[in-house]
Image (tube, rainbow, N blue to C red):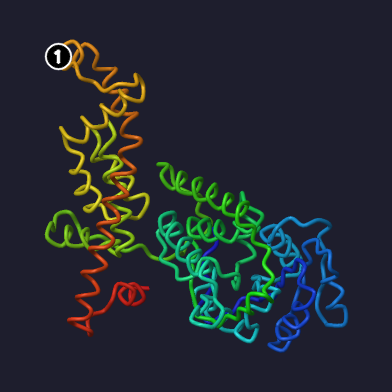
Amino acid sequence: MPASQSAGAAPKTLVVIPVYNHADTVAGVARRALDQGFPVLVLDDGSTDGSLDTVAGLPVARHRLPVNGGKGGAILAAARLARSWGYQAILTIDADGQHDPAEAGVLVEAASCSWPCIVIGARRMETDNVPRSSLFGRDFSNFWVRLECGRTLPDTQSGYRLYPVEFLQRSRFLSRRYTFEIEVLVRGSWAGLPVLSVPVSVYYPPGDQRVSHFHKFKDNLRLSCLHTFLVSRALLPWPQRRLFRDGDAAETMPSIFHPARYFKALSLEHSSPRELAAAVWVGIFLGALPIIPFGIAAIVYASHKLHLNKLASVGASNVCCAPFVPFLCVELGHYLIHGSFWTEFNRHTLLDQLHHRIWEWLLGSLLIGPLLGAAGGLVTYLLVRSFRRRREQSDPAAPSDLGKKAAAR
């Protein structure tokens, strides 16, 4: 199991430009990368527009894959080549000109402080022509990655990254296309790698000049399937495979024998508006299920595995205390099965048919739990965000949640 090398020793890095039908821009990106003094590999992922031919006159390594296998497949192929050539890291730059190769050195410098690690170039999205869909997609992706591995990252969709070659070679990935860039961050975190972020500029051309290979239906479906798998894996009790000894140090909780400090730390952990809203949803959803003997244990376990606020989850579950929500779930379940509500309340229907009532409770809770949880989560999000904004307005010197997290990292 490898350990981190000494701080200040920059990894031997190969700049990789995966390209698929970007003949108009890839040569310019390659030239600017060469100007930074880095060796460059242009890897053609089955382009049909002659993209690789446009860099024929440049001193770059070229490699062509016979068919388009997706960006993830291209990155893994580049990692195999980089390893055979003796490189320790690959630095990926999109071929569409979105990233500035002049900032590649910033990522390498950041990596030298905590190698081996993954470094993300977090895009400054305050520039012109940024699509709203990109802003939403970034925030949506950040939220799910936070649940899956506990890392608060500012831009999990940026393709401007530095990867350890050894990690890419030793890990197994389900994804080969657009979703790879999400999976690799989560698996890297699980493997014990630090995941660092440095701000970088970004360029978005006007809409009529923009070339995108993102398929809204297919790629969003792949993302949904991937996040479902990663969340399910995060919830399983056995640990993930750790390849590296030195990752980000986990925050140490105070001892339970110091209850004041312990519960204060519990109340403050994972306390952004979105995290608290998610914690409330989990607490209400699990609280609605017919698992009364071990409901609190299940809620604490799920909150811990999903990096949510445990006190918020347990507190929210009290919304589902008997008799109202369980009775509502039983009534809905009875209606779904029999087409009518349960109206005969006697010893026979309550005790002798208890197994029927529990089944109806479970069925009804699978509908009422998520909906009630969504309502509770939305109210929590709006209230917490409003409270935080008022506090910041009344005390501008008070650090925001984002500032606290940045300082902590």
For the residue pair 364 and 251, the one nearer the viewer reads as 364
Residue lying furthest bottom = 35
Q: Residue 44 at x, y = what percent?
A: 79, 66
Left or right of residue 274, residue 3 in this image: right
Q: In which quarter of the image is residue 85?
A: bottom right
Which residue is nearer to you in this view: 259 or 131? 131
- SS at badge 1: loop
Q: In this view, does 238 lie above or below 114?
A: above
Q: In this view, does 9 lie to the left or right of 324?
A: right
Above or below residue 363? Residue 83 is below
Q: Where is residue 140 shown, x and y percent of the image?
A: 46, 61
Residue at image position (18%, 58%) is 262
Q: In this view, does 66 lie to the left or right of 6?
A: right
Rendered residue at 45%/65% (across/down): 139
Q: Mark 1 points at which residue?
A: 346
Residue closest to the eye, 37 or 157 = 157
- Residue 372 is drawn in which quadrant? top left
Q: Quadrant of the rendered structure where residue 157 is?
A: bottom right
Give the residue displayed 56% in from the left and 70% down from the top: 158
Q: Position of residue 283 (x, y in %)?
A: 27, 46
Quadrant that contains the N terminus: bottom right
